[in-house]
Image (cartoon, rainbow, N blue to C red):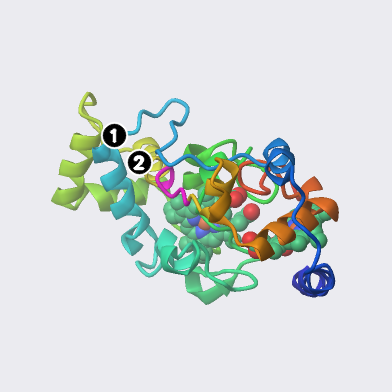
Amino acid sequence: MRNLLSSVAVSVLLATAAIAAEPVPADLRETAQEIFKPLPSTIPSVRDNKITPEKIALGKALFFDPRVSASGVFSCNSCHNLGTGGDDNLETSIGHGWQKGRRNSPTVFNLVFNVAQFWDGRAEDLKAQAKGPVQAGVEMANTPDNVVAALKSMPDYVTWFKAAFPDEADPVTFDNFAKAIEAFEATLVTPAPFDAFLNGDDGALTTEAKQGLALFMDKGCASCHAGINVGGEGYYPFGF
Ligand code: HEC
Ligand code: HEC
């Protein structure tokens, strides 16, 4: 798949060079607005999980904490590194016991807008998703009971869960762990110059980028790479 993608990328570059002199279509933005949607610059809301600053702070701590894995070595950030594009830049991820998983880790940026989670869409939202990696043998290899016990043994976490779920008598639960991570992930939204262009700012993209955008739509890339995330709108269960 990667090789295929590189050859796709090379042909796009060649094609771009060949049309470099083409004028930018006058209706470029209108056409693009029919296919793509700009990312918002505010935190989106998610279903059944009110997002509060306390929940975001707790979710952030959990995301970076290797103590939720059985070995104490892997955090969510090990494979979804926020400093390197929200993934690990490996073909397939390395997890518990240094095992290699079967799948490539997707970026966690802007994933709150995907129609479902995982390559095959088996988790319907980020709450459902966050429970997966903790228990996966090749990822964190832990159990919900162990995660909750580990979190309850740390007084700071008990305080943070109380602040994030103030109405609950026993807030340190696996469900709330997942909700807090979902709240943090909802903040990982990265509006870019492309979004500014969609919103009406002509100067946001260079002429070359505008030509590339015209080509991207013209060549049919947008039949799969469309919508708010320029992709993430369908399921890809083939061969992974
Ligand atoms: C050992 C590496 C590893 C760790 C640790 C890990 N992940 Fe993942 N993550 C992956 C891989 C690989 C996939 C793709 C799996 C699939 O599609 O079946 C994935 C998929 C996801 C997705 C779905 C994204 C999409 O676009 O479909 C989300 C969300 C996610 N992980 C969040 C987390 C969170 C939250 C944690 C910590 C609780 C975590 N991950 C820990 C490797 C990892
Ligand atoms: C039939 C659907 C389809 C079409 C058409 C398509 N893609 Fe893709 N593209 C995908 C899928 C699925 C992936 C993710 C697969 C993977 O990473 O292994 C992907 C991944 C990519 C990636 C890597 C994204 C990342 O986050 O790693 C780039 C870049 C890309 N495509 C560019 C293009 C370009 C440029 C075109 C047009 C010349 C194009 N694609 C046409 C389905 C498509």
Task: Say if 219 sits above or below 48 in the image.
Answer: below
Identify residue for label 2.
180
Q: Amino acid at mark 1?
A: Thr
Question: In percent of the image, x 58 and y 62: which residue is there?
Answer: 105
Q: Nearer the viewer, residue 189 or 75?
A: 189
Any part of residue 134 in sight: no
Question: In percent of the image, x 47 and y 69: which residue is there?
Answer: 84
Q: Position of residue 135 (x, y in %)?
A: 49, 52
Alpha carbon distance from label 2 to label 1? 9 Å
Q: Position of residue 125 (x, y in %)?
A: 54, 37
Question: In percent of the image, x 68 and y 65: which residue is there?
Answer: 208
Q: Residue 89's mark?
A: none
Q: Nearer the viewer, residue 126 or 138?
A: 126
Of mark 2 and mark 1, the one earlier in the sequence is 1
Q: Nearer the viewer, residue 16 or 11?
A: 16
Q: Is the residue marked 1 within 8 Å of ligand 1, measured from its CB? A: no
Along the horizontal axis of the image, is 185 left or right of 91? left
Task: Say if 46 sits above or below 63 in the image.
Answer: above
Badge 2 vs badge 1, beta-carbon distance below 8 Å: no
Any part of residue 11 in sight: yes
Label 2 element class: helix
- On the rendered image, what quadrant is the C terminus found in? bottom right
Along the horizontal axis of the image, is 94 left or right of 43? right
Q: Amino acid at mark 2?
A: Ala
Identify residue for label 1.
52
Label 1 element class: loop
Q: Position of residue 103 (x, y in %)?
A: 66, 63
Q: Position of residue 212 (x, y in %)?
A: 73, 61
Along the horizontal axis of the image, is 218 left or right of 60? right
- On the rendered image, what quadrant is the N terminus found in? bottom right
Magenta span of residues? 185-190
